[in-house]
Image (cartoon, rainbow, N blue to C red):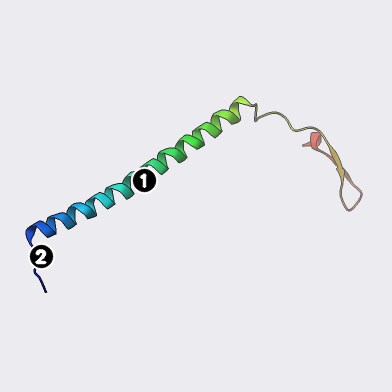
Amino acid sequence: MTQKTNWDVLVEDVSQSKAYNTILKNKVLFGIGTAMILILAVVLYGMIGGESDAPDFTLKDTGGNTFSLSDY
């Protein structure tokens, strides 16, 4: 069994650090992308008039009573 030199330990630390940085960078980019999609969805929802009134309609329940949306 060969003993690890200081150089071998340093190379291992650097390679593990690069892998960690890559994973961290991917997580940050995913978070930024998700936030941008959510912001875009809210903006587009406001632009298309998402708060318009629902059309009035009338329905009967099982007891024969009539209910209309405009009653509420």
The residue type indicated by label 2 comes to Lys
Residue 8, numbered label: none
**26 relative position to 68: left or right:** left
User: First in sequence: mark 2 or mark 1?
Assistant: 2
**Kind of element beneath mark 1:** helix
Please state the horizontal and vertical placement of residue 11, each as a whole percent of the image.
15, 55
The one nearer the camera, 55 or 36, is 36
Q: CA distance from mark 2 to mark 1?
A: 32 Å
Which residue bears the numbered disc 1? 26
Q: In this picture, is 63 found above or below 47?
A: below
**Of residues 58 and 33, the one drawn nearer to the viewer in this rendering:** 33
Relative to 5, residue 19 above or below: above
In this rendering, the label closer to the viewer, 2 or 1:
2
Q: In the drawing, what numbered circle is on residue 4?
A: 2
Residue at 90 percent of width and 52 percent of height? 63
From the image, which quarter does the N terminus lie in?
bottom left
Q: Amino acid at mark 1?
A: Asn
Residue ID at (86%, 49%): 61
In the picture provided, is 2 more to the left or to the right than 52? Answer: left
Q: Quadrant of residue 55?
A: top right
Measuring from the top left, give residue 45's x and y in whole percent: 60, 31
Residue 34 x/y as whole percent: 46, 40
Which SS class for mark 2? loop
Task: Name the residue at the right extreme.
Answer: 64
- The residue drawn where x is 55% and y is 32% is 42
The mark tally for this picture is: 2
33 vs 61, left or right, is left
